[in-house]
Image (cartoon, rainbow, N blue to C red):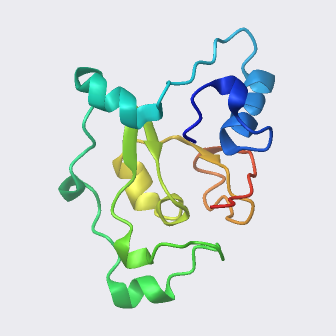
Amino acid sequence: ERSPRAESLREDSTVSLVVQALRRNAERTDICLLKGGYERFSSEYPEFCSKTKALATLPPAVPPSTAESLDVGCSSCGTPLHDQGGPVEILPFLYLGSAYHAARRDMLDALGITALLNVSSDCPNHFEGHYQYKCIPVEDNH
């Protein structure tokens, strides 16, 4: 969210909801927001940003014919499954991915992912016995 200050965030914005959940679950922890977001930070301080793992090291994407029939249990995925690419590493050991990525156990394992934060209101936790899940359902209005 391109708000100039944390105080100007809408109460129902995604960032506000995540900050509220973190405050409830991570007491005694400072929560900081990057002014200008990751986009500005990475352009000003690229030396502090790590590169993502090469997609070649990840399991291959599902072919388009298979992707169209793959049911990840999510009715609101806006990007075609065959055009998902890989999750983006935004900090060491912190990835941003989609419902498609969360449904690919081979991809999660290849990246060493052990826990997922599910902010979807309609995508299931596919591998509850294998990964830790935290659910903070957020309505996406974009």
Q: Residue 4, located in which quarter of the rendered image?
A: top right
Query: 57 left or right of 35?
Result: left
Q: Is residue 35 above or below residue 132?
A: above
Query: 90 left or right of 51?
Result: right
- Tally of marks: 0
Q: Residue at x 51, y 59 (%)?
A: 98
Query: 68 left or right of 2?
Result: left
Q: Is residue 131 above or below residue 20?
A: below
Q: Residue 82, located in which quarter of the rendered image?
A: bottom left
Quick one: 112 or 29, which is closer to the camera? 29
Answer whether residue 134 is visible to the viewer in this image: no
Image coordinates for residue 65, horizontal then vertical, percent:
37, 91
Image coordinates for residue 130, horizontal then vertical, percent:
58, 50
Task: Please identify the quadrant where the C terminus is shown.
Answer: bottom right
Quick one: 55 or 140, which is closer to the camera? 140
Q: Residue at x 54, y 73 (%)?
A: 78
Query: 129 left or right of 93?
Result: right
Q: Is residue 19 above or below residue 105?
A: above
Answer whether residue 58 is visible to the viewer in this image: yes
Image coordinates for residue 39, horizontal then vertical, percent:
38, 37
